[in-house]
Each structure stands twice: as structure tokens, then as C-alpha cells.
Image: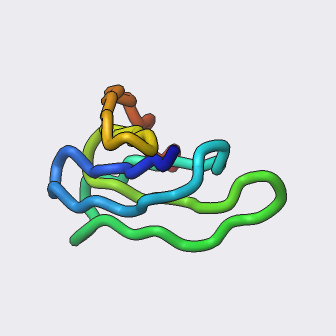
Amino acid sequence: MTVSITDDATGTTFGPYDAGTYFKLTQAPGVAGSTVVPFQGDVAWHFTFKGDATLTATDAAGNTATASCAVPPNKK
């Protein structure tokens, strides 16, 4: 199974990533675009999105399921 993650505000999609991969999501409405950088510890990737996220899981047979994820804004 793999997982892709999409910024709902920009339509930018990242992935696929292996199931079990941990992400950190931060909303930053003023950024020019979506970004992803390696993170630390158990969290593999840190995403900065303009909007919320949609996660799409795909199994080996090509079946998909999606879930919406409200991303909290970055605290200043």
C-alpha cells in the first residue's frame, strides 16, 4: 500500500510514500506554494501547505481510499 498527500489549496500532490510513513503538516496560507522537506526522528517528512490536505491510499490492486485532513495553521 502507498499513500499520496495533496494540498487542497494548490492541488500539488506528493508521493507515493510507503504505508506507515509519518508526516508533519503545517498550514501557511501566505506561502507561494506547497513544500516538503525531510524531518527528524520518527517523522520522515514535514509538509508546508497553503490549505488543508487530502490523503489517498492505494493498495496493490489499485483500489483507493481518501481522507481529508484539517491542517492547523503555523502558530506565530
At 51% from the left and 49% from the top, the residue drawn is 76
Snapshot colouring:
rainbow
Q: How many marks?
A: 0
Rendering quarter of residue 53: top left
Q: Residue furthest front?
A: 61
Image location (x, y in percent) of residue 63: 32, 34
At 27% from the left and 51% from the top, the residue drawn is 7
Rendering quarter of residue 66: top left
Image location (x, y in percent) of residue 6: 29, 50
At 77% from the left and 64% from the top, the residue drawn is 40
**68 to 36, vertically: above or below:** above
Query: In the image, is 15 to the left or to the right of 10?
Result: right
Rendering quarter of residue 46: bottom right
Image location (x, y in percent) of residue 19: 59, 45
Query: In the image, is 12 to the left or to the right of 43?
Result: left
Query: In the image, is 34 to the left or to the right of 75?
Result: left
Residue 53 in view of the camera: no
**45 to 54, vertically: above or below:** below
Query: In the image, is 12 to the left or to the right of 56?
Result: left
Q: Residue furthest right?
A: 41
Residue 56 in view of the camera: yes
Q: Residue furthest left?
A: 10
At 38% from the left and 47% from the top, the residue drawn is 27
Image location (x, y in percent) of residue 37: 54, 73
